[in-house]
Image: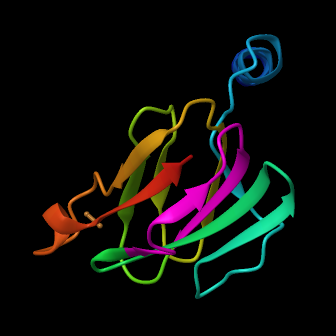
Amino acid sequence: RAEKGAFITAVLFLSFFFALIVYAAKGLNIDVPTCITDVKPYTQGQVIQHAPNRYEIHYLAKMWYFEPADVELPVGSTVDIYLTSGDVIHGFQIDGTNVNLMAVPGAISYARVKFEKPGVYHIVCHEYCGIGHQDMTTKIVVK
Ligand code: CUA
């Protein structure tokens, strides 16, 4: 039957793309930004240190700032970044890394990043979010 063939084709395509994503994540060791469901929605930004060089940052994006602002980390830190929005959709890009996320109200985005080099890593909102969009920035200082 035609529908059955179409269904099998669709399943095969889905499996193929899923395998590609798994391959990209595992094989090439690329961090795939994901949507997270095991972190409770939060309304405040915070930095949590789990171990030396092991951090978790909960970022909150709001018109027109990020919380926490200006985080300082030791060089070599691996950071789990969680991101949500307190109002509208914002962007979140850390210059000099491959972290590029969307802050969506009611959802949490996730990425892992390791800061190998000291420096100032600027974070910008790259999704137009109103009159203060241009000034919606913060930074991570790695020493
Ligand atoms: Cu927030 Cu643009």
- Rendered location of residue 110, percent (x, y): 65, 53
Residue reaching furthest to the front: 143
Using the rendered view, name the quadrant where residue 44 is placed. Answer: bottom right
Closer to the camera in the image, 100 or 8: 100
Query: Where are the magenta residues, as a range?
Result: 66-84
- Rendered location of residue 109, percent (x, y): 61, 57
Residue reaching furthest to the right: 51
Answer above or below: position of 30 versus 35.
above
- Rendered location of residue 111, percent (x, y): 65, 46
Closer to the camera in the image, 6 or 39: 39
Determine whether, in the image, residue 16 is placed left or right of residue 45: right
Q: Residue at x 84, y 67 (%)?
A: 38
Residue reaching furthest to the bottom: 43
Q: Residue at x 74, y 61 (%)?
A: 56
Residue reaching furthest to the left: 131
Q: Is residue 115 magenta?
A: no
Answer above or below: position of 34 versus 109.
above
